[in-house]
Image (cartoon, helix red, strand yellow):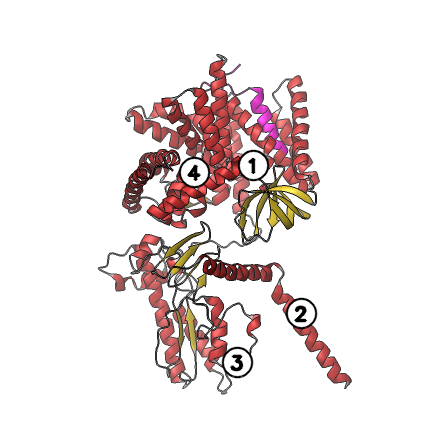
Amino acid sequence: MSKESGVYYNNPLLYIFIVFILASFTYEIYYYNKLAAILIAASLFFLITFNTERYLKIFLLIILIIALMNNVFYYNYTPKANEEIRVVSLKYNRGIGEIKGRKVNISIEASEEIVGIKIYAKGNFNRNLNISKGIIGDFTIIKYEKRKKDLTLYLYDLRKDLYDKIQSKLGARKAGIISSVAYGYDDNIESYDREKMKYYGISHAICVSGLHITMVYSIVLLFGSNLLGMIVSFFYMLFSGTKEAAIRAYIMIVISNLALKLKRQYNMMAALSLAGIVILIVKPYCLFSIGFILSFVNIIGINFFNKKINRVFYKIPSKIRQVVAITLSTQIFILPITMMYFNEFCANSIIGNLLIIPFINIIIVLGNLLILFLKIPMVFNYILFVSKYIIILMDNIMNFFDKITIDIFYIYYGAAYFYIAMLITYYFYKKGYKRFIYYPIIVFIYVSIIVYSPIVNIKYYNEYKNWASDEDFMNAAMDITLNDTSDKPFMLWLTTVSGHQPYKVSSVEGDKYLSITDGTDYSMEVRRYMSKLKTFDNGLGILLDKLKASGKLDDTVIVMYGDHYPYGLKNKDISSVLTYDLDDYEVERVPMVIYNSTIKSEVVEKYSSYINLTPTLANLFNLDYDPRYYMGTDVFSDDYLNMVAFADGSWKNADVYYNASSGSVKYYTSNEYTTDELIRINNIVTNRMQISESIIRNNYFNYLENKINSYNYVNATEREDN
């Protein structure tokens, strides 16, 4: 039996795991192209079993059939009219449920919190497969009744209760960090923190991974037995939502303990394979989950390269060397995955894992201590006090390194193929297959043909040297418009372009007016953004001057608004310019101006959004329009609801901010709302969201256009007949 890096790689479990992967992959392809699936399955099975004994080939063929039938068993279940459903997630009356371990899209009219609850539902099922997400169809629930509270619901409630208590003491942002890092409850982590974790290559920290399970198990071992450690780790796995990485880590811990108990050598690759087999039996769709993939390639990378990299950096102090070795060994296999899935590479992962992960580990420990001391306020609050300053310290470290770290690289996904070919060649070359040295050359030629194909293949990238200039744009637009010397009214819709990102790279408009920010402390990204805004400002001046010169300015109304905040800038850069906090969706605030040269200026400080713009203008112009066709309301009307709603169902006004994800309420004034008032506004927002979604799903405007055309045709025909 050959041995490499202390791990036996020809264990039958490894072959079985690969066959299960092949089965899930084949079934997904079979759904779209039966012939391609059969050819791919046969080819890959031949490659897998090429160098195996005959009896093993027959055994693996049987396993392949069983694994395929497992997929058939999962995806071909048809729910009955009455089913028991676990509500996994729900937003705007739509979400995900589980029926006998299978995922379904659910729609339900629920006036109460039912996430995590098991319900007995009556409804209609429509098969609508999404194999990569494990969804077998749509279940429309007509009526339901709640089942008794079980362990899963208790853990849901405990997690929510913990978040609410942390949020009340530390605020939404820090509560989001603690609950995501310690419990895998990542619904409430802010996008800024999520991007920051990604920037430092530590995104795995915001969901419960093998690291979390291993830490919990190790801490329990300090005070108890292996059995107690496995029991506590099991409940922590359930508490954190039974993510694939957590299941994988727990199974490997159990196998490690069994090997110790039975006095057998622990085979890490066999343990990893068994964990993968168990997960794919229960959840065959996990093969397509990025969390599942990264969790497994992490371990494979550590097994293959950790010891070798440790030996290379033997002069570095032990603790630092171990972190560097683990980071690099995992990145070797993670790199092609991130290339293919995200077309990017993060070069800051060593800093993240060396300097930030240790503090995240402390947050994990403190977060789990919060569970134990939930009912002891004095200890609970003290742990929160310590957690607060750990997070502040993490922020300071990341803010310091923001100035010297390297931005995320965006890489063409074809490079991943070549990289994988190099890894495969390395493995087989070390095993004695010398001819594999030519394999990367073949892949390189293939990728080159794709990249430099003579067949025209137009693609649009997010890095541009040049956007069109708003100065040229306004000149051209006004010349075309004002050439018409008639006095007929005109209406223009002008979408400006100079202000668009990127701001990280040099560009004509981004560099043209950099001198206006000389001597400031603004980052180069902010300075380029302001340079581009200067181009827009000049363009606006051209528009006004040409309207004035033509004598049409006084009779023209100009409406101007920003469609979004500058996505290409980091929040810290935006904060360096703005004078207000960016929390609670304040970063989404943009200007909106209605201008006419003859009207006295006035500032309207109401909460509003784009949906109110058309009704407001219609009333200002005294147009004959039907308000029932519009979602918004005239902001100057007496019945205007002074509030703005966001895409996730959250909303805010001058008094309060309601966070739909957490159900939390934050007051800005002493004017607190009753529960009935909050429910009333939530119902308004939910109704608007449902109508908006229905308009898109049912292609309402196309329907309306057809009805109008049909109506006009009938009327025209009747007039001709008369």
Please, which residue is most extreme toward the left here?
519
Mark 3–mark 1 distance (CA, rounded to whole Å): 55 Å
Contact (Cβ within 8 Å) of mark 2 with mark 4: no
Q: Could you tell me which quadrant the C terminus lies in?
A: bottom right
Judged from the image, the secondary structure of the residue bearing numbered disc 1 is helix
Viewer-nearest of discs 2 and 4: 4
- Residue labelled with disc 3: 623
Judged from the image, the secondary structure of the residue bearing numbered disc 3 is loop
Q: Position of residue 173 (x, y in %)?
A: 36, 48
Identify residue type, mark 1. Answer: Cys
Identify residue type, mark 4. Answer: Tyr
Is 300 located above or below residue 635 in the figure? above
Viewer-nearest of discs 4 and 1: 4
Viewer-nearest of discs 3 and 2: 3
Please, which residue is most extreme toward the right here?
721
Viewer-nearest of discs 3 and 1: 3
Q: Is residue 473 magenta?
A: no
- Residue labelled with disc 1: 286
Mark closest to the chain's N terminus, 2 or 4 = 4
Judged from the image, the secondary structure of the residue bearing numbered disc 2 is helix
Mark closest to the chain's N terminus, 3 or 1 = 1
Q: Is residue 408 visible?
A: no
- Residue labelled with disc 4: 183
Q: Which residues are magenta?
A: 1-23
Mark 2–mark 4 distance (CA, rounded to whole Å): 51 Å
Q: Tag 1: Cα neighbours inside 10 Å, few (<14), some, or many (≥20)?
A: many
Judged from the image, the secondary structure of the residue bearing numbered disc 4 is helix
Mark closest to the chain's N terminus, 3 or 2 = 3
